[in-house]
Image (cartoon, helix red, strand yellow):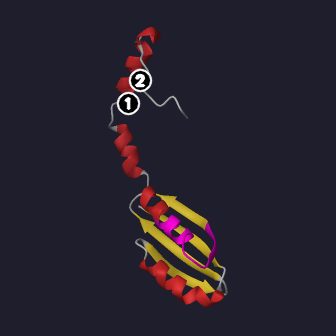
């Protein structure tokens, strides 16, 4: 579970109610406070990709000046468990004992 909070600065105050309504319609988003030209939003998503997708949708809304992520939390227990069970130790030991001439790189050479 990923949880983040955003401060959304509104450029056009006449649109603030419309912007709050649109944010509330975005998956994973909740408007939790609003004062003057600032809207505080929480995003609660299952993955980092979902969290960023919601953030980018808010960024593109008409009438928004800036969007700032103030807090972000990721529950990494599931990812840690996956990495602990993926035989990486076995792979590393195999690479360590291999002759470097026998290792063929198949990754992305363009970084």
Instruction: Return the residue nearer the eye: 78 or 95.
Output: 95
**For residue 33, above or below residue 86:** below
What residue is shown at x 56% (from left), y 69% (from top)?
A: 59
Q: Are marks 1 and 2 in contact (CB under 8 Å)?
A: yes
**For residue 2, above or below residue 31:** above
Query: Badge 1 is on which residue?
Result: 88
Give the spatial CA distance, label 1 vs label 2. Answer: 6 Å
- Assess disc 1: are there few (<14), some (14-19) or many (≥20) residues with their C-alpha within 10 Å of its C-alpha: few
Instruction: Return the residue nearer the eye: 81 or 98.
Output: 98
State the image coordinates of residue 110 (x, y, percent, origin top left): 53, 32
Magenta-drawn segment: 54-68
Q: Could you tell me which quadrant the C terminus lies in?
A: top right
Residue furthest to the front in view is: 62
**For residue 46, above or below residue 86:** below
State the image coordinates of residue 17 (x, y, percent, origin top left): 54, 89
What residue is shown at x 52% (from left), y 71% (from top)?
A: 58
SS category of the residue bearing label 2: helix
SS category of the residue bearing label 1: helix
Query: Badge 2 is on which residue?
Result: 92
């Amino acid at each position: 579970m990923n949880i983040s909070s955003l401060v959304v600065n509104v450029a056009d105050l006449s649109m603030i109610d419309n912007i709050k309504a649109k944010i509330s319609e975005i998956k994973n988003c909740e408007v939790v406070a609003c004062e003057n030209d600032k809207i505080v939003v929480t995003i609660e998503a299952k993955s980092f990709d979902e969290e960023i997708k919601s953030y980018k949708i808010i960024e593109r809304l008409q009438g928004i000046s800036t969007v700032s992520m103030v807090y972000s939390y990721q529950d990494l227990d599931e990812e840690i468990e996956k990495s602990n069970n993926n035989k990486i130790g076995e792979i590393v030991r195999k690479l360590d004992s291999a002759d470097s001439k026998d290792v063929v790189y198949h990754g992305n050479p363009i970084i």
